Image (cartoon, helix red, strand yellow):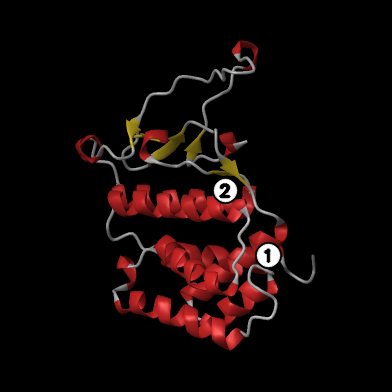
Amino acid sequence: NFKGNSLLYVPEVYLEKSTKNVLVMERISGISVDDLAALEKKEVDLRLLSERGVEIFLKQVFVDNFFHADMHPGNIFINASEPSNPTYMAVDYAIVGSLSEEEQYQIGRMLLSVISRDFIDIAKILIDSGWVAPKTRPIDLERTIRSACEPMFEQPLEKIKFGELLLYIFDSARRFDLKMQPSLMLLQKTLINIEGLGKQLYPGLDFWAIAKPFLQDWIANRYNPKK
């Protein structure tokens, strides 16, 4: 239930008016996330808005473990009643996703390893998780991933698209018989959508700066030996 998340509002469902084939939800009023002219006219804080989009994605995936997997502009609206405190409203929940605990942990580790450019650790994660052939040699996979990703790191950090980088990693691993669960493919698509929307709102969006401390805290708290 995302009602408690002040950054994202989900319209109420009217079950008594819904049928097997028709879902009836509360009507909402907002500005389409890709209507930059309207957002700028309202003097919305676009940097804050883009950063909050990343925060929502991370929370849905790693805390709620239930994410909206169809986050294109037609489904995302902005509540700009407080321009300095803009929030999101999302509709159309025909496609949603969740990860197993193992997938959550491995994806969290992988994202941190990408941020740190630790290609050997990325290779080990792909092997340990069973996503590539078990006989894969870490050094061979590491070299393949490095050759695919290093050219992207020649750009300034804020210009690198994290979702596309993840896509390159998975594509380069296909020669090692990569097998991905549908949930991971949904996650990859959602990340690309979220980052694309964020960059459209604020080209200087630094996904890395938001994701790194979030994931470090998440892993430290979730997998604390005391728990």
Please give the name of the residue rendered at 54% of the width and 54% of the height, measured from the top-left corner: 185
The residue identified by callout 1 is 221
For the residue pair 189 and 49, the one nearer the viewer reads as: 189
Numbered marks: total: 2
State which quadrant residue 32 falls in: top left
Callout 2 secondary element: helix
**Residue 152 percent location from the top left of the image:** 35, 74
Name above or below for residue 68 compared with residue 122.
above
Please give the name of the residue rendered at 46% of the width and 54% of the height, measured from the top-left corner: 191
State which quadrant residue 214 falls in: bottom right
Q: In 3D space, how far apart are the residues under numbered discs 2 and 1 (Cα atoms)? A: 17 Å
Q: What label sits on residue 60 in the rendered view?
A: 2
| Residue located farthest toward the bottom when viewing the structure as drawn | 139
Amino acid type for the residue under numbered disc 2: Gln
- Visible in this render: residue 117? no
Q: Taking 160 as reference, is 163 left or right? A: right
**Residue 133 percent location from the top left of the image:** 66, 74
Q: Taking 109 as reference, is 44 left or right? A: left
